[in-house]
Amino acid sequence: MEISQTNESRRIGGDVAAYLGRRSSLLTRRWLRAVRQHMGIRPPTREGVMGLVNQLPGLFAELRASIAHGGLEHTERRAVQEAQEHAFERWRQGFALDELYLELDLLERCIQACVREYFAGAATRDGQAGIHEVIESFFSSAIRSAMRQYQLQADRRVSEALAERDAAELARRISEERLRFAADAAGLGIFEWDPATGDAIWENARMYEITGQPSESGPLNASEFSALMMDREEAAQLCGQLQAHSAPGERLHAIFRIRRPGTLMPVVVEVSAQYMAGRGGGQRLVGSMTDITRRVEGEDALKEADRRKDIFLATLAHELRNPLAPVINAAHLLKKGDLPPAQLRWIQGVVERHARHLANLVDDLLDVSRISAGKIRLRKEIFEIRSAIERAIEINAPAAAARGHRLEAPRLDRMPAAFVHGDCTRVTQIVSNLIDNAIKYTPDGGHIQLRVARRERTVALEVEDNGIGMDPASIQTMFRLFEQEGRADGQKVGLGIGLSVTRSLAAMHGGSVRATSEGRGKGSCFVVELPLCDGPTAEAERADAFAPRSVSLRVLIVDDNYDAAESLAAVVGDEHEVRTAATGEDALALARVFEPDVAILDLALPGVSGYDVAKSLLGERRRENRMFLIALTGHGQPEDLERTRDAGFDRHLVKPVRPEELMKLLENIGGRRT
């Protein structure tokens, strides 16, 4: 009997399911109309309508299967899945939770009404209650599953939103920390001012460091800052600039000074007006402040260096023109011919003095360039300091005598021996520069005194004068490049590089230079200290004592400058046999016949260069009878010396060479030949 009832229920359920299938289009239209008319559900868009239509078939098919089988036990899992997919689609389309519930509830009502219509026309109403229960259970399960799925999506969206918020907050903190770190590294103080309330926020400690405001006192607002830290005129000017740049996002760049103990410190500010909606609203001034003291000092230093450069160039032109005038005049006098011997000697002295002066100027300029580039090289040897002092006095004595100065120096023959390991020529230059400086800045008829004091580990050379003196505050600037002091008559003399070169050369010898003066008109004193070393060995002294005398040499002079070659031949020809050549080819041909002991070669020769001539000459002479090669050139950089050494030259002399130096070198070569 129970089996018969079950079969009957399934038959009725199948008939109802088939009826619902035939009426599916009508059901869909009713459902859509109900959804449109219901006030709790938003008016569906075309996309929403298509979503309803597309979602209905699967859910409706599962309901019919449940009715046909008389319960949910066969189709519950599939129905739940369809309900979840429907809920997810509604979530994607933006439906709210109550809208989803109403949509499914309306669908259930439409289906229940359609079932009642079926039984109203049926012969019997057996099984109607059971089918209504199946439909109610189906939709109850579907609605619960759909709402669970919807809630899961909502929870997932909330979790994602919270995670995004946390990530954004972390990124904001990292960004603020990076900004704060960058601001601190750049020396920026960050501030915020509220013009309406007077509130102030200083974002980092750098603001307190720049302003000198104690951190425990808190930040200064705009009015306090302008009153306590700024000059009144600059404060008014800054206020006007802020008003002119008050548009949101507009930036103001301003430079002014703030008061610090004992000084006014230049600062630069970058300010922009912003509306801070999240912090009480209203307009706020947000900006940065930077201490630019070093930048201003650097700019001032560059301006001062530029000013001193201009003075130097003007002075250089003056210094170069001055000696050229008497040389040109002397050359004009020589054109007359038949000049008395006294006048010839006077012309000779004029040309020699001023040519030497020009050579010294060029040497000073080259020294500055080499020292600045770190290319100057010292030819170190152990020598007695007296030799450098003697040469310096010899160099400067004529200039001192011309101005009537009394140049007083100690009896060098009574001085205890003091040996220095260094470049004798450069140490001579140090002493000569100091004596020359005293001559320039001491009025005619003045007194210049040179003193030498040997101490435990150093020897001190003092050059004191009774000249114009110096302001004690400006003493250290005297050693700067291109720095000059005016003489008593207001005239600038020299190039302003002598003392700078002197200090650099002393430092290269491990020594120092200092200056003192009691003020203007009270003279100056410069002191050089150099480290002492042990003297040369007795064997070296005996070797010098028994050095053989020089002999006459055969000297080949090669220079494409005719005047340079012939004038040098005239100087050397008094003691040695000389031949000249103007090209490398002529020099090689002449050397085969003349067989010189010494060749003095210019390097920049037409055709065959001086380097190639040197290599050829060395290849043609046997090792035991090798000639001595001297490079005489205008190039004197370290790389030039290295190149001549590689080419086989024995010495490198830079034009213009002093005749005494060249003759001394030839004398030494002749002595070694003997």
Image: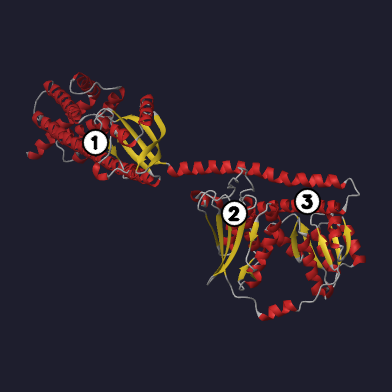
- What residue is disc 1 on? 82
Q: In the picture, which quadrant includes the N terminus?
A: top left
Q: Is residue 131 above or below residue 655?
A: above
Mark toward the viewer: 2 or 3: 3
Q: Nearer the viewer, residue 240 or 454?
A: 454
Q: Give the label on residue 643, or none.
A: none
x, y (%) of residue 301?
A: 51, 44
x, y (%) of residue 239?
A: 35, 28
Q: Is residue 293 above or below residue 249?
A: below
Under circle 3, the secondary element is helix
State how far apart marks 2 and 3 are (Cα). 27 Å
Q: Is residue 528 above or below residue 30?
A: below
Looking at the image, tell me whether mark 1 or mark 3 is earlier in sequence order: 1
Name the amino acid, label 1: Glu
- What residue is disc 2 on? 499
- What residue is disc 3 on? 350
Q: Is residue 124 above or below residue 436?
A: above
